[in-house]
Image (cartoon, rainbow, N blue to C red):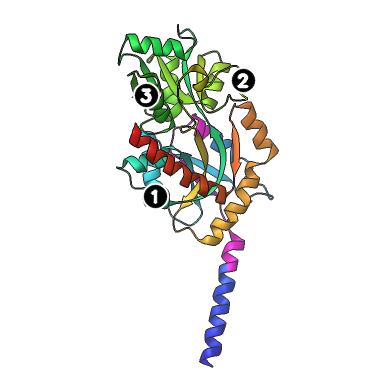
Amino acid sequence: MKKLIASAAIALMGLAGTAIGEEYPERPILMMVSYGAGGATDFQARIVTMTAGNEDALGMPIAIINKPGAGGRVGWNWFATQADPDGYTLAAYNVPHFIAQSIKGGVSYSADSFEPIANWGADPAVFVVAADSPFNSMADVVAHAKENPGKLTFSGAGLFVGHHIAALQIEKAAGVKMAYIPTKGGGAAAMKAVIAGEVMGGVNNLSDAFRAQEAGNVKILGVADLQRSDFLPDVPTMQEQGLDVDNSSVNFRGVMVPKGTPQEVIDELAATVPEMFANPRVAKKMQAGGSPMHIMTRDEVKEMWAAREQTLKELLAGL
């Protein structure tokens, strides 16, 4: 009799586990963005989640909440230490940002603090100047920096984010010292500093820069990637302009959950979210906004995180 009761209990536990997976999600979901409203991550996160409520997606909407500060550290610290691991609070990740920050220390997270779900985009860093700037190429920027050591000011979204990594690579490749100024509020604030003339230039996301250039506010002088972007076919890479800058600063964006989230919830999200990203409406809006897409599955993201962590350990040690 005891064996019969025990067997029945185990069977009921198995059914309960299945039910949890089948019922998820039962209510709307939040997704935390570690940068301010209007920047590239926020802009793209709102696009890629816009079909979440559809029956062929999650069947529940995803609402974006912003927790900006310290180059993403404020939001990711909160997510790693306070977010409930129940599948109802997701976060946007930015790589290399959060991995580089964890390598440098002083934060409460690492790659082991989170479980990746899927990647939606890969956004290269670009060097921008105001539309009326006398600089028209990276050679102009480097020449001015050499003549005025430490006086060429340029903005970025924070410390040890993709912008900062690209900035460090540019300085090392050119053999110059410039004045990198991290701004509060992410890429949107960094771009505003360039447009307002508060700095002489800036490193920013291609997607933010594309929209600003389309509006006539900036000029894009170089792309920190291994090849030119389809969005900017006339803008040469840093390497084409004689600077040994690779694609280490390319900003991969996607969705993650806190460590400890039930596996059945992770499996449901991992199966559904990449298809949600692939929706034609999403692709059309991302294309219109100059936002490069690069959809990756959970397994592919895990491999990317591991590879980037190894690359960043080597790169940051050299910088």
Instruction: Please indicate, yes or no, whether residue 30 appears anywhere in the rendered image.
Output: no
Question: What is the quadrant of residue 318 in the picture?
Answer: top left
Could you tell me the amino acid type at mark 3?
Lys
54 left or right, relative to 316: right
Question: Residue at coordinates 45% horizontally, 9% vertically from top-left?
Answer: 135
Could you tell me the amino acid type at mark 1?
Ala
User: Would residue 21 be counted in the magenta stretch?
Assistant: yes
Question: What is the quadrant of residue 25 in the picture?
Answer: bottom right
Q: Nearer the viewer, residue 253 or 17?
A: 253
Residues marked 2 and 3 touching at CB (< 8 Å)? no
Q: Secondary structure at mark 3?
A: helix
Q: Nearer the viewer, mark 2 or mark 3?
A: 3
How crowded pointer 3 is (Cα within 10 Å; few <14, some 14-19, many 20+) is rated as some
Q: Quadrant of the N terminus?
A: bottom right
Residues marked 1 and 2 touching at CB (< 8 Å)? no
Point out residue 69 in the picture as x, y percentages from the top left corner.
37, 35
User: Would residue 126 be counted in the magenta stretch?
Assistant: no
How crowded pointer 2 is (Cα within 10 Å; few <14, some 14-19, many 20+) is rated as few
First reached walking from the N terminus: tag 3 or tag 1: 1
What residue does disc 1 label?
Answer: 80
Instruction: Please indicate, yes or no, whether residue 161 appears anywhere in the rendered image.
Output: yes
Could you tell me the amino acid type at mark 2?
Pro
Answer above or below: position of 278 versus 180: below
Give residue 172's mark: 3
First reached walking from the N terminus: tag 2 or tag 3: 3
**Magenta span covers which residues?**
18-43
What residue does disc 2 label?
Answer: 233
